[in-house]
Amino acid sequence: MFRRITQFCKQLFAEGEQHPTTESIQQGADNAQGLSLSITPRNAHTISRKNISENALKVLYRLNKAGYEAFLVGGGVRDLLLGLEPKDFDVVTNATPEDIKKLFRNCRLVGRRFRLAHIVFGRDVIEVATFRGHHGNEDGDKISKANAEGRLLRDNVYGSIDEDAERRDFTVNALYYDISDYSIRSYGGGMEDLNDGVLRLIGDPETRYREDPVRMIRAVRFATKLGMRIEEVTAAPIRKLAPLLRDIPAARMYEEVLKLFFAGKGQANYQMMQEYQLFAPIFPLLADTIADSPKGHCARMVNLVMRNTDIRVMEDKPVTPAFFYAALLWYPLKSRAEEIANESGLSLYDAYFAAMGDVLEQQCQTISLPKRFSVPARDIWQMQLRFERSQGTRAFKLMESPKFRAGYDLLLMRAEIEGGNLQKTASWWQSFVEAPEEERGNIARGGAKSDAPRNRKRRVRRRPRSEGGSGEGAKANTGSDS
């Protein structure tokens, strides 16, 4: 028996020498879902420590030196293998959050749904998570909780690296870079899917989406970002389960929307979100307006905003949620203002101000917009109401507003969509803004001259008012406001 074991070990060792690229191990009892594991040694992959954050390496080395398992995991490993620059580097370990805090003075523990350790190096934060385990391994208050729809509310269940891999969302994210020997552990065929350009969910898709509906959005985002296709079984339940996104906390959805539309793939993400019916649950006002007129102003504005945002990201220009939401929601705002004006008898100008609160309140039910962005969004909307009133010498004062440029950009976009008189207004402002400073006075006076006949008519009409006439004076005031 001893000889047979010795011979088997020699044969296994010899096979390892003959095939140094990948060692495949099929998991048994320790891996309930039967995820395959392949280990790629250092000489068979392209990841170099030179491309890994220095701070992430510090965390990995200290955990390893203290006797814990430590791996770079998920998107950082995936992007490095694809030759992309990772946005962040996440670490996973068998050390508990409390153990991690003892090792790092610059550590703070965060999260309720799943406890995480954030190691802070100035502005750089390395997120460290403990291996997640199966729900059945309940120990005291380290247990998971789910609601009636199956969404996880708390998930502080710790386990092994094999169990952690099963809890990952997609196979291309179940990749672990081992700091102890610089190998890569790939679960569920993650390396193969990465090479084949396939996005595959780990486990039963419907169950996994119910646990966390945001995974449906992540499927879209990864597909466009990585140029991958969503595997058929993974895609099948998305349309049916899309309404579950309404239950996601609005603050969390705000962060997810930034990732979707502020990374240079906004237009592609929007189109795929529409395809899988994921857009309506988080932008209900836009969805309703577009449904009423699929090729109307609102639909065209959304496409224009997405395209322009992508261009700005690609050109490394700043993008702000204030302008993004102000532009997206302009036509729902316009529609709501017209409704209020018809129902209440308010002037359209006053109705716009009333509608701003309604529109922002409704949108914030699904996507929480911080005040630092919602207030400037209102300013940008108010600008639209002032552009037609401020041609001529008033233009100088309007240009002093901190939100002038954002409001002006939205005016140009509206003019591109609507044309007509709005295009004339936008053209005047464009000539005024782009003119040298010394010529703006002439342009402004030219605008003032065009208003002169109306002003003279108003003065003439005021004279009989002292004799008892009021109707003409009221009409003149209305004219000067238009």
Image: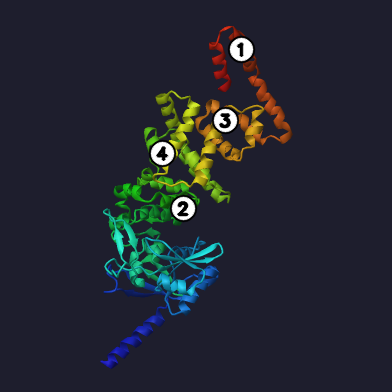
Using the image as rendered, state which of residue 342 and residue 51 is in the foreground.
342
Distance from the alpha carbon under mark 2 to that under mark 1: 58 Å
Distance from the alpha carbon under mark 3 to that under mark 1: 26 Å
Element assignment for label 3? helix
Element assignment for label 2? helix
Q: Residue at the location (37% across, 43% down)? A: 280
Looking at marks 2 and 1 on the same chain, the residue that comes earlier in the sequence is marked by 2
Using the image as rendered, state which of residue 134 and residue 16 is in the foreground.
134
Q: Position of residue 169 (x, y in %)?
A: 36, 61
Q: Quadrant of residue 168?
A: bottom left
Left or right for 445, reference 49: right
Q: Position of residue 182 (x, y in %)?
A: 47, 75
**Where 14 falls versus 225 (above or below)?**
below
Distance from the alpha carbon under mark 3 to that under mark 4: 24 Å
Looking at marks 3 and 1 on the same chain, the residue that comes earlier in the sequence is marked by 3
Q: Quadrant of residue 111?
A: bottom left
Looking at marks 1 and 4 on the same chain, the residue that comes earlier in the sequence is marked by 4
